[in-house]
Amino acid sequence: MDSDAVLISIKEAARITSLSRTSINEKRAAGKFPQPVPLGDKRIAFVRSEVDAWIRERIAARRSVAA
């Protein structure tokens, strides 16, 4: 399956990023987290590859500060 086509719940996004759902929603509102895909009136999901890229960006930012 194409990794760009894998959707994950906000609960799963919270688990893999170690952020709370509240923190994810705050970061989304500030434009600092990948935007969700609406699935229904009250249901969203995130593209797994975009969340993975966000994690890699945090790791890279840490390395650039340490250098």
Image (spheres, rainbow, N blue to C red):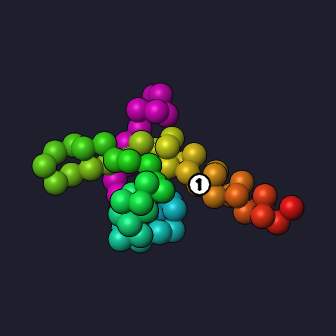
For residue 22, say whether it is visible: yes
- Determine the residue positioned at 47% across, 69% down: 19
> Which quarter of the rendered picture does the C terminus lie within?
bottom right
Secondary element at image label 1: helix
Residue 17 in the image: state x and y as whole percent. Answer: 52, 62
- Determine the residue positioned at 57% across, 46% down: 53
Residue range highlighted in magenta: 1-11
Which residue matches tag 1? Answer: 55
Residue 58 in the image: state x and y as whole percent. Answer: 63, 58
Q: Residue furthest right?
A: 67
Location of residue 6 (image quadrant): top left
For residue 12, say whether it is visible: no
Q: Residues within 10 Å of mark 1 (few under 14, many from 20)?
A: some
Q: Amino acid at mark 1?
A: Ile
Residue 39 in the image: state x and y as whole percent. Answer: 22, 43
> Which quarter of the rendered picture does the N terminus lie within?
top left
Residue 52 on the magenta segment: no
Residue 7 on the magenta segment: yes
